[in-house]
Amino acid sequence: MRIELVRRPQTSALFSILSPFLALVLTLIAGAILFAILGKNPLTALYYYFIDPLREVWSLHELAVKAAPLILIAVGLSVCYLSNNWNIGAEGQFIIGAITGSILPVMFPTFQNFLVLPLMMLMGIAGGAAYGAIPAWLKVRFNTNEILTSLMLVYVAQLFLDWLIRGPWRNPKGFNFPETVTFHDWAVLPAISYESGRAHWGFIFALVAAVVVWFMLSRTLKGFEVKVLGQSPRAGRFAGFSRGRMVFFAFLVSGGLAGLAGIAEVSGAIGQLRPSFTTGYGFTAIIVAFLGRLNPLGIVASGLILALTYLGGEAAQISLGVSDKVVRAFQGMILFFVLACDTLIHYRVRLVRPAPKEPAPAAAAEASHGNA
Amino acid sequence: MGMLEAILLTIATAATPLLIAAMGELVVERSGVLNLGVEGMMVMGAVTGFVVAYSTGSPWLGMIAAVLMGAAFSLLFGFLTLTLVTNQVATGLALTLLGLGLSGMMGRSFVGLPGVKMSAIYIPGLSDLPLVGKLVFGQDPIFYISIALVIGVSYFLFRTRAGLTLRSVGDSHKSAHALGIKVIAIRYAAVTFGGACAGLAGAYLSLVYVPQWVENMTAGRGWIALALVVFASWRPWRVLAGAYLFGAVTIGQLHAQALGLGIPSQLLSALPYLATILVLVLISRNRRLTMMNTPASLGQPFVPDR
């Protein structure tokens, strides 16, 4: 038995819509098998993962809290990946955005008025974009592989954060805990609705970013440029589009959005900088981007789904005693299945029996005789 | 044992996992496939090696299990990218993310347990020689495997017909296919070899380097190995040089931390990563040279026509 791909004359519209759902179903099945191996009842486990977190208003708020950074980062990454720029260092840009955004409340705590919050957000965007510009500049100027440089910069950013909050930025009254002062009231991103839960304005930012980038990609010349340069750099060059400028554009957009996600997370969900405020959102967002088929509106949906796996992981950890690492394994599986199912968009998959060896023609002739 | 000898020995231990993983990836990339999942395969090797060695008490069984796990895990990547022709960059990333998750899950109840260390070999007389004794005749077995790998891969790629075939597949899969070479089968073999090497490199970390299981203990070494392949312009002996250079940087910064020169330890810890970026910049800036060395079909999807 052999698998053979037959290229479709044109991409299948059906499977472009169906493939993410197919991937999710396959993930659920694989997840059920995984839980069975771990000795848990698969149905109970899946219930705790995917249904339980949706039953109460407060946990829907938590869903929005977790989805906000994922959507913001993934929307930016979609611009990168569509234009064939492999930024996988969003985690680093997320951290640097959180740091530059925190400069005002940490270093100038007496500066307190309505200007603080907008300035923080802008500084977060600027910081993330500047950090994203490094691999872009290296790629354009020195032809350096952006996958490796952007990833290396994640480790550098993590160490920089660690140094900052154990050294100069540590809260002097914090009993030596590695964390900054808690932000004053003007520096805290407000909740959308205080009465019902914790969801903050970061989620609104995420929705706005998704719509804006969707509009840019599907309705403007810039969006066309992104796709042309991504699919065929040669055609892009003939059209007069600049590859170098596109590299910067993609990295600045994705870095800026990752930076905004970083400062929104710190200011909205946590209220201070801590070493543990990053839970790998920058890497999970890669999965979000692909599950959303690199379409910003699809990314909103996939961001909510991946956020659900985080919440479900917490719920399952408490009620079933399974490791929180199951979540990571789950997320990795989703990406695998998404990529595999995407094959169906471009190819028809056929199972071919191995052709019988020498006596094949005779056997075939006999078989047809038999039928006649 | 003199100070110099001690430093050289630790450099070798820091360089060996990078060298093994990079040698595997070099063969994979020479066949035209870019597997960014090295980190994931390595961490799976590390956890498997530790768990098996801990449960059986034999580091050798641990090592073999790690190699098999690395190879099996890479087949997942192979199936997707070679049979289903998915995007190699994205699939490699998926392999890394899945590996980091699965390894954390598998190793959860083994965190902090005392591991089984693979002991260094000892040849009476030779191992006691001054200066070179320990360095040449008294290392752990995986060190010798790593050197054998460099010699073996170098010989295979440039002195055998099979090696030539593999390189031709990496440089032009269309021509190779037209000549009747089984492109996909060769790539499967290369990817599996790369996975086995990454698994072995992971086992080195959890059986020799620090005989312990710590989550994410690869700490980006898989990615540095990928960078080393570019740095070495896809040549085995240059990978050896690069790996020892990185080993030296890693050990150098550890010694600097121990001396306490007043430099923040985090800055020193960041040095290997910064060095990776610097080295990539230096090697990539000459576009013509890079173009010449890079396997021409690297990362390109291939669907055989019939």
Image: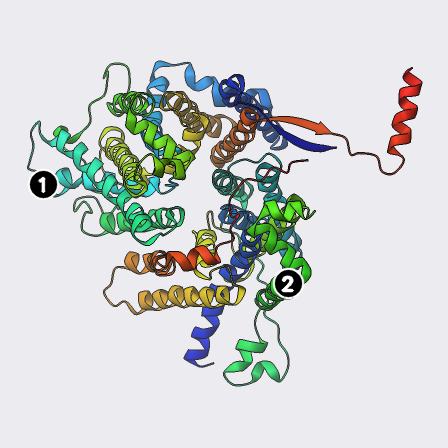
> Is residue B195 visible from the viewing direction of this image?
no
* Nearer to me, A183 or A211: A211
Callout 2 crowding tier (Cα within 10 Å): few <14, some 14–19, many ≥20: some
Q: Position of residue A331 (x, y in %)?
A: 48, 32
Q: Residue at x 53, y 47 (%)?
A: B297
Q: Nearer the viewer, residue A101 or B107?
A: A101
**Residue under label 1:** A108
Tell me whether marks 2 and 1 sit on the same chain: no
User: Where A194 sits versus B122, above or below?
Assistant: above
Image quarter in which the C terminus of chain B is found: top right
Mark 1 surroundings: few (<14), some (14-19) or many (≥20) residues within 10 A: few
Residue at the limit of the structure toward the front, as seen here: A238
Q: Is B124 situated left or right of B108 in this image?
A: right
- Amino acid marked by disc 2: Phe
Question: Mark 1: which amino acid?
Answer: Phe
Q: Is residue B228 at all visible to an observer of this figure?
A: yes
Compared with A157, A220 (above or below) is above
Residue at mark 2 = B156
Tell me where residue B156 sits by quadrant.
Answer: bottom right
